[in-house]
């Protein structure tokens, strides 16, 4: 059985353990990992990942 679930809610992943987690920013796939990637995003946020990857992207929830 295979499925694609798109979510911003890490809590959902407490019930559905993914094999892969893909992160998209600005319409591009920027990072792939396992369930630990979702946990890291919940703790550190998308801005830290963006900065780590050296991407020049403004996130929706950032202040102007």
Image (tube, helix red, strand yellow):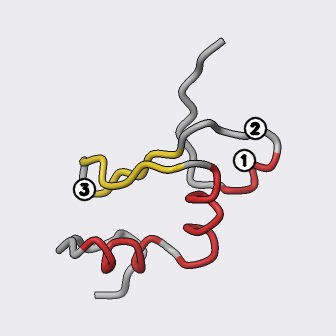
Residue at the farthest top position: 1
Residue at 56% over, 59% down: 37
Looking at the image, residue 23 sits to the left or right of residue 37; the answer is left
Identify the disc placed on residue 16.
2
SS for dot 1: helix
| Residue labelled with disc 3 | 26
Is the residue marked by circle 1 packed among few (<14), some (14-19), or many (20+) residues within 10 Å?
A: some
> Eyeballing the image, is 2 above or below 4?
above
Q: x, y percentage for residue 15?
A: 82, 42
Q: x, y percentage for residue 12?
A: 73, 47
- Is the C-beta separation of discs 2 and 3 under 8 Å? no
- Is the C-beta separation of discs 1 and 2 under 8 Å? yes
Looking at the image, residue 32 sits to the left or right of residue 3; the answer is left
| Residue labelled with disc 1 | 13
Which of labels 2 and 3 is toward the front? 2
Residue at 17% over, 74% down: 56
> Eyeballing the image, is 48 above or below 53?
below
Is the residue marked by circle 3 packed among few (<14), some (14-19), or many (20+) residues within 10 Å?
A: few
Q: Foreground: 32 or 56?
A: 32
SS for dot 3: loop
Marks 1 and 2 sit apart, C-alpha to C-alpha, by 5 Å
Q: x, y percentage for residue 51?
A: 31, 80
> Eyeballing the image, is 35 above or below 42?
above
Residue at the farthest left position: 56
In terms of sequence position, does the residue under pointer 3 or pointer 1 come before the other? 1
Which of labels 3 and 1 is toward the front? 1
């Amino acid at each position: 059985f295979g499925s694609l679930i798109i979510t911003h809610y890490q809590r959902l992943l407490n019930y559905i353990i993914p094999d892969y987690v893909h992160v998209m920013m600005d319409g591009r796939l920027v990072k792939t990992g396992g369930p630990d990637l979702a946990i890291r995003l919940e703790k550190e946020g998308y801005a830290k990942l963006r900065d780590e990857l050296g991407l020049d992207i403004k996130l929706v929830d950032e202040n102007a």
